[in-house]
Image (tube, helix red, strand yellow):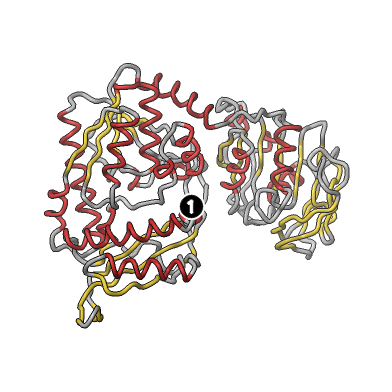
Amino acid sequence: MEERPVLVLDFGGQYSQLIARRVREARVYSELVSHRLSAAQIAARKPLALILSGGPASVYAPGAPSLDPEVLRLDVPTLGICYGMQLMARDLGGTVAATGASEYGKTELEVSDSRLFQNLPAEQTVWMSHGDSVTAPPAGARVTASSPSTPIAAFEDEARGRYGVQFHPEVVHTPHGQEILKNFLYDVVGAPPAWTPAAVIEEQVERIRSQVGSERVICGLSGGVDSAVAALLVHKAVGDQLTCVFVDHGLLRANEAEEVVETFAGHFHVPLVHVDARVRFLDRLAGVTDPEQKRKIIGEEFIRVFEDEARTLGDVRFLVQGTLYSDVIESGGDVGVAATIKSHHNVGGLPADMRMELVEPLRLLFKDEVRRVGEELGLPERMVWRHPFPGPGLAIRIIGDVTEERLEILRTADAVLLEEVRRAGLYRELWQCFAVLPAIRSVGVQGDERTYAYPVVIRAVTSEDAMTADWARLPYELLETISSRIINEVRGVNRVALDLSSKPPATIEWE
């Protein structure tokens, strides 16, 4: 399947990554690549189809992204979306102009007989976002849809397999958008809907076996879904050639360390080295209040512990890393599939002198696909759907220096918060939800006594991708229960506050 991808050519539009995801949701494998690829490079990938994305520019603007003219002469079904449609029209002899009638937002579309719109209503709502319009379709193409201010809102040249739509089928504001994409993929292209979690597992297992052979492999487990799924895929491929190393730095949430050990050693029987390094980390963090300094210390210490363990295992050639496809795609998608990975995805930023070859079984998957593969592999639901959790853990949710007492308070308060959110059935609706402990004390009254204790801040957000986030509107009754339980059950806390800031301007984490 990955041998014959649907290639989404990225012209810099904000929805380019979304197009690739929508194609995958139709169970057809797709990749996002740069519009700068030559026709020869594209042909070498033997694509089933091409989709030209939207873009922010006018096709006539100086320096506007363009396409190797030979690409449109390849015998590959092609769908142009928004800017992609205008580029096709211009390069194939049609015309594009600034008609003065730009459209942004929901628009009513009238469609005529067409393969893209087959079995769909003759009138439908779509999402438009364009200034220029196609004013004459290329020779051989006929107009298949129009809107009040855009007479040519779609065209198709069935004989040559060229299709263009001015609107965005990939966004949720186009209700029939996914069906339009499926008509293109299944009916026009004839792509089989075969890219499923089971197929991904099979394909990756083959790939890992051919890369690793009979060599030994090491994987650092964090307790997160990415490292867990990567480890299980490698274990499925090469069994006990894999050793997982789980460094417990003492900064995890309640019961997480036990869950990791139980899941991997107990349930899946993966060879697991469990390193209890809690004292080491706390000693190094004593008195440190600067967040960057905390991150640096934890990262360095993690590497040291990991290196020590790797040495005791002897000669290990391969290191598993949970790099995702979204880490591989450069932000903005300018270079297409770039090989630059965010540094925090190296387990704490592994040192250059660890001469190991990387095994990255998730580097073609988006986060939601990793979760689906995890479910297919039998990973427990709590791990599959675990909220994102920072590498430095609770150390950056204590605002101030990290002590055993503060960790215990935060861990207990956080456990109460998550338990109540789960009981209310809201856990999966939230992107993240956690407690923060500012190391300040405020006055309170409990019984007849004045208290001088910590506040706990509740942070709950909804988000699609963590680039932007909105504070979650949790029901008052739920907040009341959480607040009352934390104050009554967690010693050392006398006040609960709620963080009502969105990202931007605030970040999701406090440090």
Q: Assign a secondary structure to mark 1.
A: helix
- Asked whether 97 or 85 is in front, the reply is 85
Q: Residue at x 58, y 28 (%)?
A: 45
Give the position of the N terminus as an image quadrant: top right
Whether residue 35 can be seen here: no
Using the image, determine if residue 396 lies above or below residue 196. Answer: below
- Asked whether 148 or 100 is in front, the reply is 148
Q: Position of residue 219 (x, y in %)?
A: 30, 33
Q: Residue at x 82, y 61 (%)?
A: 149
- Residue 196 is drawn in which quadrant? top right
Q: Amino acid at mark 1?
A: Arg
- Residue 206 is drawn in which quadrant? top left
Whether residue 122 can be seen here: yes
Q: Is residue 131 left or right of residue 406?
A: right
- Asked whether 428 or 229 is in front, the reply is 428
Q: Position of residue 383 (x, y in %)?
A: 39, 43
Direction top: furthest residue: 214
Residue behind mark 1: 428
Mark 1 Cα shell of 10 Å, populated few (<14), some (14-19), many (≥20):
few
Q: Residue at x 56, y 40 (%)?
A: 32
Q: How many marks?
A: 1
Q: Is residue 46 left or right of residue 442?
A: right
Q: Position of residue 174 (x, y in %)?
A: 71, 53
Q: Position of residue 362 (x, y in %)?
A: 44, 35
Give the position of the C terminus as an image quadrant: bottom left
- Asked whether 7 or 206 is in front, the reply is 206
Q: Residue at x 44, y 71 (%)?
A: 500
